[in-house]
Amino acid sequence: MDHPLLEFCDTEKQKQVIKLCMVQGKSQYEAADILGLSRGAIKHHVKAVRQKAAKRGYSPDHDMNKPVPDGFVVSGVSTYYNDDGVATGQWVKSKLTEENRLKALNEAIKEAVSDYEGKAKPTKLNKRKAHADDVLVAIPIGDPHIGMYAWSEETGENFDTQIARDDLLNASRKLLDATPHAEKALICNLGDFFHADNQSNQTSRSKHALDVDSRWARVLKLGCMIMVDMIHLALKKYPQVEVINAIGNHDDHSSVMLSAFLAAYFTKEPRVEIHPTVSKFNYVQFGKCLIGVTHGDTVKHADLGELMATDKAEEWGATEHRMWFVGHIHHSRKTELRGCTVESFRTLAAKDAWHASKGYRSGRDITALVLHKDFGEVARYRCDIRMARWGNSE
């Protein structure tokens, strides 16, 4: 007879251990001898399976006997006991795992933006020069904070959605004019593209009050079209444009919506690839280059190399130039780890009242990196806020 814990085994080895210990009644010492493992390894496998089962609602030793469906985890259990200590009732609360929650949200948003499907007009490619297929132009966009409001009397400079749009698109034009004619551009939105995630005007996790410009729905629409315009600018120069939108701590949900919107908008444009936003960590391989993209708010920079090697073991072994692009801290910092580099990028956005009061004074710019498929980074171009605003913006 099968044991309920078998349902929660992830590997064949775990199944063998559970069958021996739980179904056949072997001791952990006996199971270790049979499988040629140490007792510590047997103990580890049993513990891992029990922990996964408990997260799904199955732990008989604690009167938890009602597993939740695949894709869900238990968020709370209330068990009622009579005077004799016998369980008489139980209330099990469950929620989607983070990965499945994002997938479900992504599907819901795709349906919501279906009216925009295929709306992108064809963009003519400038073919005045040959396009090199051995180089990639990567453009990390650090924390645009579309929808943030700043008053010059309080922060030293005015900032709103229109200013954010003009700055980002003007800087992008200047960068694209400077970069070589590569076969592909990789636009990496490093998170916090939107300043507020919903109309509560608070960060969803820490509930920090935010200074916002206008209505959230209006900012959402304008922000989506800013990215549309940036992609069209890239399409004029590069045959292929690839886009990654990382999840920030300001835009947990709207970042998912942004990718779904862009995927619908450019669905009939074969030259555009929009990565779905379903994970905090995103990867792209180009020849011997491996690029990781994340906001940088959930993992220490020092741990990102190990994470990349674990998540993309095959790609790690096949590449030589491995790099992480991160945002969040709003200033430039590059760290060389064993096997990869981690670089944070500045933002073009002005300071809000909170950052101004705390003394933050980082520079403001946007950077484009030229990556060769064999040699890694071979050039980079930078446009700071003054250059973005200099001259004719159109």
Image (cartoon, grey):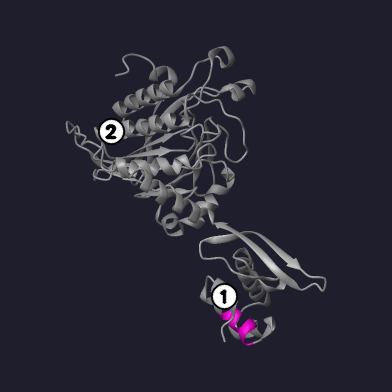
Please tell me whether residue 19 belongs to the stretch shown in magenta. Answer: yes
Q: Is mark 2 on a helix, strand or loop?
A: helix
Image quadrant where one finds the C terminus: top left
For the residues labelled 2 and 1, the Cα–Cα distance comes to 51 Å
Amino acid at dot 1: Gln
The residue identified by callout 2 is 232
Residue 317, compared with residue 218, is above or below; it is: below
Q: Where is residue 89 in the image (x, y as percent from the top left)?
A: 69, 68
Q: Compare residues 52 and 320 and report the one nearer the observer.
A: 52
Nearer the N terminus, badge 2 or badge 1?
Answer: 1
What span is in magenta?
A: 16-24
Label the magenta part by its dominant secondary structure: helix
Amino acid at dot 2: His
Residue 363, compared with residue 268, is above or below; it is: above
Q: Which residue is drawn at 53% across and 66% down?
A: 69
Estimate how packed mark 1 is, as few (under 14), some (14 to 19) or many (20 or more) residues with alpha carbons within 10 Å: many
Q: Is mark 1 on a helix, strand or loop?
A: helix
Residue 264, compared with residue 216, is above or below; it is: below
Q: Position of residue 15 (x, y in %)?
A: 55, 78
The reply to whether residue 372 is in sight is: no
In this picture, residue 238 sits left or right of residue 192:
left
Estimate how packed mark 2 is, as few (under 14), some (14 to 19) or many (20 or more) residues with alpha carbons within 10 Å: many
In this picture, residue 59 sits left or right of residue 146:
right
In this picture, residue 48 sits left or right of residue 80:
left
In terms of image quadrants, where is residue 362? top right
The residue identified by callout 1 is 14
In terms of image quadrants, where is residue 155? top right
Q: Which residue is drawn at 37% across and 44% down?
A: 112
Q: Which residue is drawn at 29% across and 26% down?
A: 177
Q: Residue furthest left?
A: 128
Q: Compare residues 378 and 153 and report the one nearer the observer.
A: 153
Image quadrant where one finds the N terminus: bottom right
